[in-house]
Amino acid sequence: MNIYNRTIKIEIPTRARQVLDSIRGAGFEAFVVGGCVRDSVMGKVPHDWDITTNALPEDIIAIFTRTIPTGIQHGTVTVIIDNEAFEVTTYRLDGDYLDMRRPRTVSYSQKLEDDLSRRDFTINAMAYNDQLGLVDRFGGLEDIENKLVRCVGEPDKRFNEDALRILRALRFSAKLSFDIEGATMESIRRNSANIEKVSMERINTEFEGIIKANTNKLSLINDLDIRAYLFGDFVFNQADLTRAMKLEDIASDEGYLQASKRAMVFNHYRGDLKGLLRFFKYSKKDIDKTIFIWTTLRDDKYADLLNENATWDDLRLTLKLVLRDARDNILAKYAIYAKIIEKYANIGLIFNLFNDIIETGECFSVSHLQISGRDIIDEGLAMGKEVGILLDALLCQVISQPQLNEKKRLLEMARKIQKQ
Ligand code: ATP
Ligand code: MG
């Protein structure tokens, strides 16, 4: 196979080219490599430009004025040019994988081919520079043409070295809309129980990548041993996965959108989802968002959002209830969207109603009440924890009858409640 392809031209941005030129000027080889080459060949704009070189980390540190030893133990130095960061990694030959997590030894190499051969998939194992053109040792270009995710080398060996590559295969397949090549897929089936040896943080990153790119690809996990380890008895529900895809239409806030999709793919999860998300090492913020949306999806309290006979007033009331529970307008908005995704063809109507409630200053939170905790205490109506409970009881009434939101009336109501 001719591994050099000079007919392909990649337009390397100025600063990345500057990094390549400086390394070359110091007498070393340097190429852009991995995701940026794959994306360029596919006509996409890469989000970052990784560089591979035979120069050692200390050489890189000596060549450039601004460097950060971000991953020095893996041979990676970050080079900063005009505030843009480039990861420069020395050609590596990974040693034995003892624990299937990370290579026992990382040894540097002088050969680009060594570095390409340690990479996961053929589409990710191409390098490029202006002098040699595209270096494609494993047929990555052909696999891109055929839309295939294929292991570099022997799949069983590669998935045994690092079982995270199984989820990475699904992630690239989701992101690029590629199939997983036959032998690679068979090997995934054989080796997927090995995922137990991979850290949850790494799993989380790839899992989120799949959710972000194409939730439908999660159905592949249903047939793999990975499923039992990660999710127990749970199997992804195809209808939920498709719904999660539809949520893409509201892509205004990445974090909330991702939480909505996450909640939706677990819509039929019957266990302790919070516990599962903790096991997956999600942040508390992400867990809270996901759980709120997930709870909204299944909560009867908001049934009017799905009720054929609900009037605008009913819907208005329900939306205020969601707003009250969410304590965050954006979260409420995403939760509602997830809940009603299939019911309202014209989602805009619901959002107009939603925005109207917020803009007209209708009361849906204790802070909107015309009475404060201070007032309750001063009137001797309650103390300590009771204050909050009482305010909440008042809020419930005001949500359904906005005209009650007036200080005198509220105090009267509070007295009545406390007498009961
Ligand atoms: P993305 O655009 O999604 O970031 P990427 O190809 O840059 O895609 P990264 O996860 O950033 O993916 O990894 C960068 C490169 O490092 C990959 O293209 C691949 O060559 C290599 N790589 C990353 N993880 C592994 C792994 N677990 N095993 C082998 N090679 C890997
Ligand atoms: Mg990357």
Image (cartoon, helix red, strand yellow):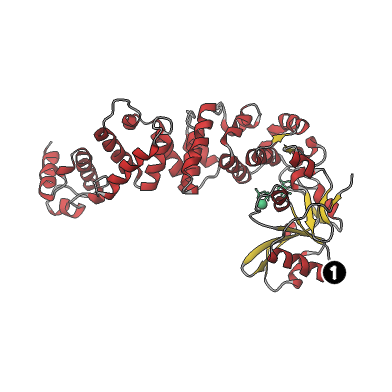
Please identify the residue farthest to the bottom as the structure is shown: 65
Quarter occupied by residue 337: top left
Residue at position x 89%, y 47% in the image? 2
Where is residue 240? Give x, y as percent: 50, 30
Quarter occupied by residue 292: top left
Q: Amino acid at mark 1?
A: Gly
* Figure check: 231 above or below 51: above
Is residue 175 at all visible to an observer of this figure?
A: yes
Where is residue 230? Give x, y as percent: 59, 34
Q: Residues within 10 Å of mark 1 (few under 14, many from 20)?
A: few
Residue 397 vs residue 414, the one in the foreground: 397
Where is residue 407? Give x, y as percent: 13, 50
Where is residue 154? Give x, y as percent: 82, 37
The quadrant of the picture occupied by the C terminus is top left
SS state under label 1: loop
Residue at position x 39%, y 47% in the image? 330
Please identify the residue farthest to the front as the structure is shown: 7
Q: Is residue 131 left or right of residue 266?
A: right
* Figure check: 4 above or below 260: below
Q: Is residue 322 left or right of residue 51?
A: left
Residue indicated by mark 1 = 27
Residue at position x 66%, y 67% in the image? 80
Residue 182 vs residue 349, the one in the foreground: 349
